[in-house]
Image (spheres, rainbow, N blue to C red):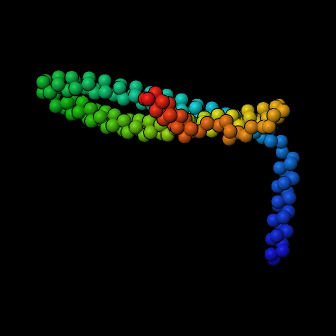
Amino acid sequence: MALITRLTRLFRADAHALLDQLEEPEALLRQALREMDEALAQGQARLREREQRLEQLQRRRHDIETRLAGIGSELDLCLAAGNEALARLLLRRRLEGERLAEQLARQRERLAAEQADARARLADQQQRLEQLRQRAAVFDHADDSSEAPWRAEDIIVSDADVELALLREKQRRAS
């Protein structure tokens, strides 16, 4: 049984090595960049849809609040005239409007939180895409130059590098 497992593992390793030789790294890298661009564009489209939905919710809530203000003046008129039946109807409308406004506010808060999360994810995706593009540029230029090829790690700037440079610059300016 152990012999069969080892032979299977050896066959898989040879098959993976063969596939690795058949694949073109440049074409795979370009395809990965295209797929990441598409995913980023789709995420941005969803973000715009959420923004439109937030604006719709805000407009609807504003309309409800305007109607509630009108109901308040009508309610004053009904109570001054002693028409309690109409006042009850207006109170029912006002209560319904207030509850609807509360639901819209909760929905807007939830959507705003989702929006913030989506923005953070998109920023992260954008950063990863830029890093991949930098690596791809290094890979493309490594073939063109007669000098020793650069490694992608040599030119990619991380957030920690930026923070460290900022601290150094602040220290230099302070002295």
The answer to whether residue 112 is left or right of residue 7 is left
Q: Considering only vertical position in the picture, is 85 above or below 19?
A: above
Name the side, left or right, on which 6 lies relative to 37: right
Q: Position of residue 23 (x, y in %)?
A: 84, 45
- Which residue is found at the position 68% from the left and 41% from the top? 153
- Tally of numbered discs: 0
Q: Position of residue 27 (x, y in %)?
A: 80, 38
> In terms of image quadrants, where is residue 97?
top left
User: In the rendered image, is residue 118 in sight?
Assistant: no
Q: Residue at x 65, y 37 (%)?
A: 156
- Decide which of 156, 39 is in the foreground and name it: 156
Which of 104/127 is in front? 127
Residue lying furthest front: 175
Quarter of the image for residue 37 reads: top right
User: Who is closer to the viewer here, 158 or 48?
Assistant: 158
Residue appearing at x 58%, y 32% in the figure: 44
Q: Which image quarter holds the N terminus? A: bottom right
Q: Would residue 48 be visible to someone looking at this image?
A: yes
Residue visible at 21% across and 33% down in the picture: 88
- Quarter of image, res 67: top left
- Check the image and report above or below for 98 versus 6: above
Q: Quadrant of the C terminus?
A: top left
As drawn, is 88 to the left or to the right of 138? left
Which percent across, then down, holds residue 58? 40, 28
